[in-house]
Structure formats: C-alpha cells, structure tokens
Amino acid sequence: MTKAESAVLLAVRRWVDLMVVGLNLCPFAKAEVVNQRVRFVETETQSEVQLLEDLAVELSLLAESPAIETTLLVHPQVLKEFADYNQFLDEVDALLHGMQLDGELQVASFHPDYQFAGTAPDDAENYTNRAPYPVLHIIREASIENRLASYPDAGAIPERNIKLMNKMGRQQLQGLLARCSS
C-alpha cells in the first residue's frame, strides 16, 4: 500500500466526505474537494519537534503554491492525548509567527477526542472538530475571509453546526466517525 493509499489517509478522506462535506460542517469545503484543491498529507513522525518541522514544510508549500487551497496534515503517531495536542497549538501559533505567515495562513485543529472549553467530553457539539486522527488543517486566511464575506449569515455557521450535532446525538455521531475508519 502506498502512502497515498494508507488506511489513515483513507479514513481522513472519508471523514471529509461524510462529515465535513456530507453534514455541511464547512460550507466551503465541497468546492475545494470537488476541484481537488485539498492536499492530504500523512506524517509518520513520533515527536513534536519533527511534527513542527513537517508543519513548517507544509506551511511553506501552501504559501508558495496557489494551486493548493488547503492542506490537512495528519499525524497519527504523535499528540494522541487531546490535552497535549491542545497545548501544542501554542507552538503552532509561534511557528506561524516565526515564519511570518500569521495573517496569511492559519491552522485549524481536529482530534479524535476534541473537546471545547466548557463542554463535557461526551457532548455532541465536540464532534464538529473530531476526526479519526489528529489533524492540523492549514487554511489560507484570505480565502476564508472572502468566502465568509459572501456567505449569508456566516456568523451562524458554528451555532448551526452545534444544533446539528446535538440533534444527531453522540451515539449517531460516534457511529458516523467510526464508519470513516472502516
């Protein structure tokens, strides 16, 4: 099996198709998936230092490659614990700043155990940011700003997603997320 065909990447692609696009969690994702402007990358690193190095490579590539709209850097072997992952995001912000890419690129976070502040671990709304594996999602800020400016009631997207997650319920969402890895 080639790296592009790994079970990890297939699971993340299914997650994008079934949950991100399928549930319309991100109303801007479908066009990029259809136009094949999403880069899926798996790193086999087992250290946070190497993950930052891999992230720096992907940040540079995205900054220099207008044909790629967004990158999902999947890192299944490092930061498996959400608390560690969440703390690591400070290092991600420092890297963006150090590379002088803050304001140009941003990194969104997804994790199998994602938990928003003020929620219980089993709250359904956490599934808006749960993925089969830890993912650092690199996004062009200008693209997001342009899409948000032209999207009716863009500020309601998070609330709409939370309502959908709560309506579906934790059990259904767990099943849907499990389907991504099968």
Image: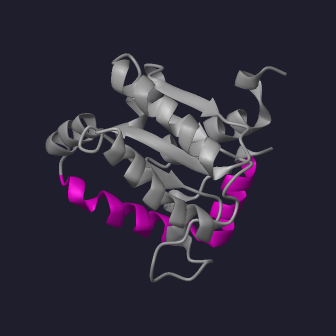
Q: Nearer the viewer, residue 10 or 30?
A: 10
Q: Nearer the viewer, residue 148 or 27?
A: 148
Query: x, y percentage for residue 83?
Result: 60, 71
Q: Nearer the viewer, residue 44 or 161?
A: 44
Residue name at image x 28 percent, y 39 percent: 100
The quadrant in which residue 104 appears is top left
Range drawn in magenta: 153-179
Residue 17 visible, this angle: no
Query: x, y percentage for residue 46?
Result: 74, 47
Vertical relation: 174 (above or below) 57: below
Q: Please check the rendered image and state whether residue 174 is part of the magenta-colored stretch, yes or no.
A: yes
Residue name at image x 50 percent, y 81 percent: 119
> With 21 as the anchor, is 169 left or right in this view?
right
Residue 179 visible, this angle: yes
Residue name at image x 63 percent, y 51 percent: 48
What secondary structure is the magenta-colored segment mainly? helix
The quadrant in which residue 37 appears is top left
Quick one: quadrant of the N terminus?
A: top right
Residue name at image x 31 percent, y 57 percent: 157
Quick one: quadrant of the C terminus?
A: top right
> With 161 as the anchor, is 85 left or right in this view?
right
